[in-house]
DNA sequence: TCAGTATATATTGTTAACAAAATAAACAAA
DNA sequence: TTTGTTTATTTTGTTAACAATATATACTGA
């Protein structure tokens, strides 16, 4: 089934979305993709079907595939779903995190500090997403981890679509405080911090302004690595 | 893209799974499916890619597609995910349900009573799933609704795989009590009842008595099934 | 210039044919 | 019988060609 080839396309598109190189509404042409990844269209079509199932791509009959553009209502549903899922994840983390996990979290925080100093917004957004996904992995529930992966992807889409009020996205030390609460095994506090953090992100989104702007696909989707 | 044709295959397979006509491990041959739905294999392959993204089907390279067989760990993750998601759903329901919604819930309860009298287990399981999906629809969060759809599907798979202790699956009047708590707008009680209900279902599953279709070898012993 | 229409191009949808791999069957040797 | 090997059959994977549809371009007439 050449699972590798197909999943490579999927992974690259997902990476590009979470990096905000691919923005909402961008058309994903079959020929363009099969040229980029040097494969035939059948692979591309299956990859697009998968991405559509992940709800990050819309398939329109006879028109093609487009990166989905979440509405405000959809965005709010997504954030509510994130609160539901990450609430359970953080509880798992507080209960299950071992020393290695805590070290990984601390290490990630310093990484986020470095990124912040670089003033590279897409990179910062990516690092922020990685923090949430690290928590999901430490929580050790693969079902929740997969769902959160989809939801954070779509969150990147939302932020790219509508923009945010403040330059700093995942606020300065909210992540740090969350890690502290995990380290002190304070379940209630950790849950409250995560919930507050997610509401904070949602509240900073400016649903009024919508700025869809797109570039050529070949720039955005460089199949750099194998 | 003949979205209709492809989604028809997907829907039929999902229905068959939730009805337990399709059981874990069953092979979904491409030719068999394209014959059944009188379409070409390209459609079938895309449908299988979608089902794989929903995690109800495993795609094994050069071997084909098989209805997935959740492990015990996976099953527990699924139930935890359900508690996380349905907790938020029921909160939405208590807040948002109008008179029509309550009427629909009452109507469904009488339907479940009728089904119970018929002693048709698959039908009962389907009706039970429908109750949870009705709650999800009334909750009006499409993201959570879609995830719960997947999770209830996989729950059907789990129950079919491992079996349950008692004949009655979704216990006699737990659903009724949940509806009552919704009608009286008792959020805390509704959440507690749903959580308890889900734990109840999980506890009735006999993970010890695995049916002999776990390993890949048992697929071969298994005669092909419609 | 602008609207509307016709033509040309490009893109998606469909099908069939063929290659590669896995499974099933047949068969020979112990 | 049982085991191992070879052959045949089935199934999955890949590719290309063609049809249907949508988009872009050119053209015509006010």
Image (cartoon, coloured by chain):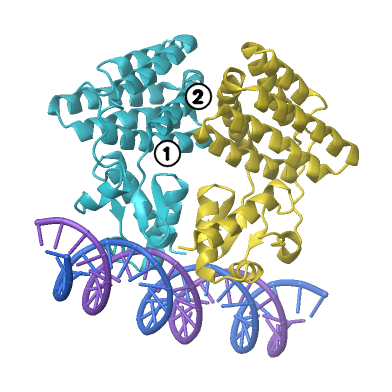
Chain colours: A yellow, B cyan, C blue, D purple
Would you say B214 lies left or right of A87 here? left
Say left or right for A143 vs A66. left
Count the labels in the image: 2
Above-or-below relation of A26 to A193:
below
Residue B103 in the image: x percent, y percent?
Answer: 34, 23
- Spatial separation of the CA atoms under disc 2 and disc 1: 14 Å
Q: Residues within 10 Å of mark 2 (few under 14, many from 20)?
A: many
Secondary structure under tag 1 reads helix
Q: Nearer the viewer, residue B63 or A71?
A: B63
Choose top left, top right, bottom left or bottom right for residue A31. Answer: bottom right
From where the camera sits, is residue B108 visible?
Answer: yes
- Report whether B97 appears left or right of A211: left
* Residue in the picture at 48% in, 12% down: B187
At x 41% / y 50%, what residue is drawn? B51
Quarter in which the C terminus of chain A is drawn:
bottom right
Per the image, the residue denoted by label 1 is B150
Sequence-wise first label, 2 or 1: 2
Find residue B147 and report its horizontal and vertical position in percent.
47, 36
Q: Chain of mark 2?
A: B
Q: Residue at 60% of width from left, 27% of height from top? A: A86
Which residue matches tag 2? B84
- Chain letter of the residue beneath label 1 in the structure image: B
Q: Position of residue B44 (x, y in %)?
A: 37, 61
What is the quadrant of residue A82 in the picture? top right
């Amino acid at each position: 089934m050449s699972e590798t080839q197909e999943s490579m396309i999927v992974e690259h598109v997902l990476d590009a979305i979470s990096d905000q190189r691919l923005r909402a509404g961008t058309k994903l042409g079959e020929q363009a993709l099969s040229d980029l990844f040097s494969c035939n269209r059948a692979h591309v079509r299956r990859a697009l079907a998968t991405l559509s199932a992940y709800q990050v791509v819309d398939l329109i009959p006879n028109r093609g595939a487009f990166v989905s553009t979440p509405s405000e209502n959809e965005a709010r549903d997504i954030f509510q779903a994130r609160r539901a899922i990450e609430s359970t994840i953080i509880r798992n983390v507080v209960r299950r995190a071992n020393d290695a996990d805590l070290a990984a979290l601390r290490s990630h925080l310093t990484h986020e500090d470095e990124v912040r100093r670089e003033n590279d917004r897409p990179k910062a957004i990516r690092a922020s997403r990685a923090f949430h996904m690290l928590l999901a992995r430490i929580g050790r529930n693969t079902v929740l981890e997969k769902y959160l992966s989809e939801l954070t992807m779509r969150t990147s889409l939302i932020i790219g679509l509508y923009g945010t009020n403040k330059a700093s996205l995942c606020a300065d030390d909210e992540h740090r405080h969350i890690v502290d609460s995990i380290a002190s095994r304070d379940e209630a506090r950790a849950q409250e911090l995560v919930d507050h953090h997610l509401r904070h992100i949602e509240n900073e989104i400016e649903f009024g302004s919508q700025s869809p702007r797109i570039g050529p696909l070949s720039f955005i989707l460089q199949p750099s690595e194998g």
